[in-house]
Amino acid sequence: MRFIGSVIEKLQRHPKRVVFPEGDEPRVLQAARQFLALQLGAPILLGDPKKIAALAGELKISLDGIRVINPKQSEELENFVRRFISLRRDKGVQADEACKVLVQPNYFGAMMVAMRQADGLVSGASHTTGSVLRPLFQIFKVAPQNTVASSCMIMEMEDTRVGENGVLFLADCGVVPEPNAEQLAEIAVATAQLARHLLNVKPRVALLSYSTKGSATHPSIGKVQAATALAERKAKEKFLEADFDGELQVDAALVPEIARRKTHDPKVAGHANVLIFPDLNSGNIASKLARLTGRANAYGQILLGLNRPAADVSRGSNAHDVLGVAAIVGLQANAYNVLYPAADMTLPGE
């Protein structure tokens, strides 16, 4: 609660509107109530109002102050359909097809954010990653000056000696299966930007491998080495103060004594607060392993590189996890023009 408590405190100063497409999911309903009670902003639930009201009654949760929208009956549906047709013009999407798509809560919620009727979106508690990401990638754009969308998981560990007072940023754990060196560098910089924004400290970014400083040779290691150099250059271009080091094994990245044996550069090694994985397999496995065995609170996946804030939570998340992710998305929205300059200048289809 140290980290997420500070996020909540910051968001209370500038509350935001967050849309939850899974309005009839108990954990989401509980998180939305807490979001409102903590004065973090206005939660918006999507779904059948009767089903949501019945569930709220069973859980003894008040819906006062919580906006509930049925996409099928929304006055905005016609406008959203026109925008979606414009967005998908190259696919030849027609009005009837667009309407069938947009009554789906994940699509409707993404369009609400794109059309500035909500500031961020949180979904995934009962939907697969694909069903959450597909609408976002079809409706949102990759932010200006970015070429890839990715994600990060934020872990809050009990051991405060790890990372930044127990907080670690892990990427990419949810989107890009096999990033090349250029993509890996962009993922590293985007994650460092978010860490800088949320923690207000200098990011110390370790690009991970099964090798430390040439202890093994393989094309995958060369990719990590090249990505490290590219990340340093990209960070300077964005005027982001951050330290990058790679390739590093995870123990050399996190444990000072081991870092001293394996490397002679102490800027990152042994003190990393951002871990960048070479591929999705390693990132996803490591993040779930840390959560299950390390008594860590996990907040994510926070999506990076898109022109609007959104997150895809795990289906294993509890209400506290969903609340934490919603708070992070809200705080992202407050600084999106800083994280992604010019990202909010145009509406979809323009």
Image (cartoon, rainbow, N blue to C red):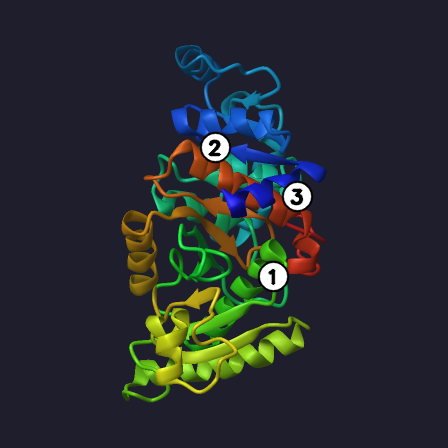
Residue 348 rendering spot, x and y as whole percentages: 63, 48
Q: Which residue is mark 3?
A: 10
Q: Amino acid at mark 3?
A: Lys
Give me the C-alpha separation between circle 2 and circle 1: 29 Å
Q: Secondary structure at mark 2?
A: loop
Q: Secondary structure at mark 1?
A: helix
Report the side of 68 relative to 270 (left or right): right
**Is tag 1's residue or tag 3's residue first in the polypeptide sequence?**
3
Q: Amino acid at mark 2?
A: Pro
Answer yes or no: do the residues labelled 1 and 3 have beta carbons within 8 Å?
no
Which quarter of the picture shows residue 283?
bottom left
Answer yes or no: do the residues labelled 2 and 1 have beta carbons within 8 Å?
no
Q: Which residue is mark 2?
A: 21
Vertical placement of residue 101 versus 341, above or below? above
Q: Secondary structure at mark 3?
A: helix
Which quarter of the picture shows residue 236?
bottom right
Q: Amino acid at mark 1?
A: Arg
**Is tag 2's residue or tag 1's residue first in the polypeptide sequence?**
2
